[in-house]
Image: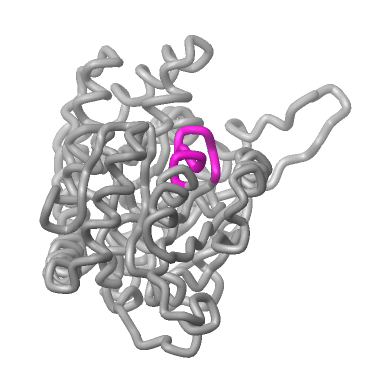
Amino acid sequence: MKIGIVCYPTYGGSGVVATELGKALARVGHEVHFVSYKQPFRLSSFEQNVTFHEVSFTNYPLFEFPPYETALASKLVDAVKYSNLDIIHVHYAIPHASAAFLAKQILAAQGIHIPIVTTLHGTDITLVGKDVTYEPVVTFSINQSDGVTAVSENLKKETLDSFDVTTEVEVIPNFIDLSTFQHSNKAHFKTAIAPDGEPILIHISNFRKVKRVHDVIDTFRQLVARIPAKLLLVGDGPERKKAEQQCRDLGICNNIRFLGKQQAINELLSVADLFLMPSENESFGLAALEAMACEVPVISSNAGGLPEINIHNETGFLAEVGNTAQMAQYAYLLLTDEEKMATFRKNALDQAKCFDIKRIMPKYEKYYEKIIDQSKKLNS
């Protein structure tokens, strides 16, 4: 199968999932063509059966903003025609789904019929897509896709509730490559962070308001008032400066480290004891799943798709959004009960195994085959 994958090349979850899916598909023999304005950061080395098509566009004085969507559609037309693609899979609806539709129409006029699968990842539906500026195009693009998938049951429900969607939405969850997220012994690293053997809590995000980093710090403040602990804050974004000031105001900076963006996430997770994710909304919670793959229990909100991966009182605990007192109490309960912590660690890893890429990738292969077959029948 020759598969075109359109994604954002940045650190966001949709780009990570798209890139890892493409690499996995290539390893089992499919020919994968990535299309984006920059090489995806997870595509950092040569991969057999993988080709990257860079979308380039010219800045004319007439354009205040470069017409990326048009350039993307043109590049897709080129990739389909000259690489003989069987299917296009776009990740994140805006603007990829509408660009793919335009490319499909251009190709159809030339007698080439290419099916399109759109995967909805979260904010393309829950935040940006609901904006009146984009909603009509998002709805149209979803309905014009030959196949639509969502990364969680919660996101599927929100899509159907918020948009006039007539296309069937299939849930194929996000995944991890379990072999790269296994708990390992990093005793020397852990000692450097917590020299007196204090438990280590960790939070990883893009520091947007929806991630509620201030709740992470407030939860930690309440915990550290009861037992010694350390907190690692990984990532960067618009809320980081406020978070740093919050730590200073609370006088707990000596117990907190801001590490910025990191690529070796598995090494950081391998020294952690608990993962904090108090988000206001999460379509899936990929970072929490990565923590669980490293045998790290999760204390999270019960928002969005999080209850689908973090099982309350088994792999961690769920609390209402903003209830930092409850989250701190759950953290204290686990960190002071070695037997319970050991059970939760095992449960977390067992749950992560259910989302291993080896289990999820075949779902995409089967779905591609279904959509390609339907397209052939429709256009025969």
The relative height of residue 79 versus residue 246 in the rendered view (above or below) is below
Q: Nearer the viewer, residue 333 or 83?
A: 333
* In the displayed structure image, the side of residue 18 where residue 75 appears, left or right: right
Please state, as top left, top right, bottom left or bottom right, where the C terminus lies in the image: top left
Q: Position of residue 52 (x, y in %)?
A: 54, 61
Q: Position of residue 242 (x, y in %)?
A: 64, 39
Q: Nearer the viewer, residue 371 or 347?
A: 347
* In the displayed structure image, the side of residue 200 where residue 345 appears, left or right: left
* In the displayed structure image, the side of residue 48 where residue 353 appears, left or right: left
Q: Nearer the viewer, residue 177 or 114?
A: 177
The relative height of residue 356 versus residue 186 in the rendered view (above or below) is above
Query: Which of the 4 image quarters holds residue 315?
Result: bottom left
Q: Would residue 291 be visible to someone looking at this image? A: yes
Q: What residue span does the magenta drawing correspond to? A: 207-216
Residue in the picture at 21% in, 38% down: 375
Q: Position of residue 137 (x, y in %)?
A: 44, 17
Residue in the picture at 37% in, 76% down: 270
